[in-house]
Amino acid sequence: MIKRRKKKLRISTLLESLFLSLSFQVYSRLKRAIRWLLPGLVVKRWMMTSGLGLLIALVGASVWADLRPIYWVVEILFWFLGFITTFLPRTIFGPIVFFVGVFLLIWGQGRSFNSIKQALGTKQETVLLDALRAKQKLKRGPIIVAIGGGTGLSSLLKGLKRYSSRITAIVTVADDGGSSGVLRRELGVPPPGDIRNCLAALATEEPLIRRLFQYRFSSGIGLEGHSFGNLFLSALTEITGSLETAITASSRVLAVQGQVVPATNVDVRLWAELENGDRIEGESAIGKAKFPIVRIGCDPPRPPALRSALEAIGKAEMILIGPGSLYTSVIPNLLVPEIVEAIERSKAPKLYICNLMTQPGETDGLDVSGHIKAIEDQLAGNGMNKKIFNSILAQKELSPSQLLDYYKSKGAEPVTCNPNDLISKGYKVYRASLQGKKPTPTLRHDPRSLGLAIMRFYRRYKRGKKT
């Protein structure tokens, strides 16, 4: 008797859990179906348009055929229903047909959405509805132009692509070291390194494709030290005859979210004047200067900007300058006069993002005010308005750590900020924790923290503009 009760209890528990599981699945599917009715997906209107088109086409075909097919279909349908109900009562046949129809509708729609998801290349664990909503949200994000180069710009882009797909990265093409320098000298192509990093940062393609693009050969005669992406871009540049066209083709391969544009298509070579009067040439040499840099320039002077870069700045809703090496990544873009003039004309908010640490041989001893002064002096020396942005984003004071001590042992110091000094010069200063909360092997901008701080700045600007 006790065994029977236990057996019945187990069966009851099993049936109850099965019922709860089915109920949860039905609830989840129903909830997901209702979410398709939310505004902004641009799906409902076209489904309704398609349905209306089908209905109108059927009515037109019926009128064209003098309505006879409608009479035939109605007569056949009534005859079939009458024939079936002689065997099955209406109360049984009706629900069976209704639920079969609902099942076929849900099954067909589910298979259709899975096919669309596969065609879009969406990850298997991602629900199509969520992917579409995320895509629409990114399309409604602000139009952002980010100007710079090096790892600073790629970190910035990784953070920004979570908030907008309307991003343009304007990248310096003055690099002459490493793989980029070798390809520049050997093949006569513009240095592809910074452009490659930005394309990889904005890519939405599978991680394996991004890793392939960033893969660096560790051995092989002539290949060692080169990255696959650099070779790919250099080959495309020679095939198409233009770096800009090569970037466009690479963007399609990587499904880039936005666009990457070189600051100029001219073969630019940097030079710098030092405090002791010496003049050094080449981007790689400037980064190792033994005396403070007084002025920086390029050959040929006043290079022209690409039209696509100027158009992007003209349409921008927010312009970001930096982060990156001050004299070899940020200022080289400002040596293109047309870019500076376009920034001045823009009514968008302009934010300068300062580095976390000084760079030995390039920005020794410079605080945030020193970075700003270097940019102002450079612009004034070139006969341009020395104040092209009015807002600054800087790091909060860094907490003591072993990593910070390690950087100090290598000659790098935190870039300190004196807000009062900058405010007295007419700048708005925003400070945030930009290195992230998780421990990292390097002291660099954390993409998520940086992106969040920038979007907070933009929302604050929008609120202030409304009031």
Image: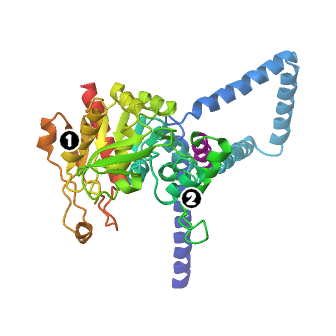
Residue for badge 2:
22
Q: Residue at x 41, y 36 (%)?
A: 301
Residue 172 image position (x, y, % from top left): 44, 44
The answer to which quarter of the image holds residue 465 is top left
Q: Is residue 431 above or below residue 414?
A: above
Q: Are marks 2 and 1 in contact (CB under 8 Å)?
A: no
Please indicate, yes or no, whether residue 459 appears anywhere in the rendered image: no
Kind of residue indicated by mark 2 = Leu
Kind of residue indicated by mark 1 = Val
Residue in the foreground of this view, choosing between 455 and 126? 455
Residue 22 image position (x, y, % from top left): 56, 58
The answer to which quarter of the image holds residue 52 is top right
Residue lying furthest front: 277
Q: Residue at x 50, y 55 (%)?
A: 181
Residue in the foreground of this view, choosing between 276 and 326? 276
176 displayed left or right of 72: left
Magenta residues?
245-254
Q: Is residue 139 above or below residue 433?
A: above
Residue for badge 1:
429
Residue in the foreground of this view, choosing between 162 and 396? 396
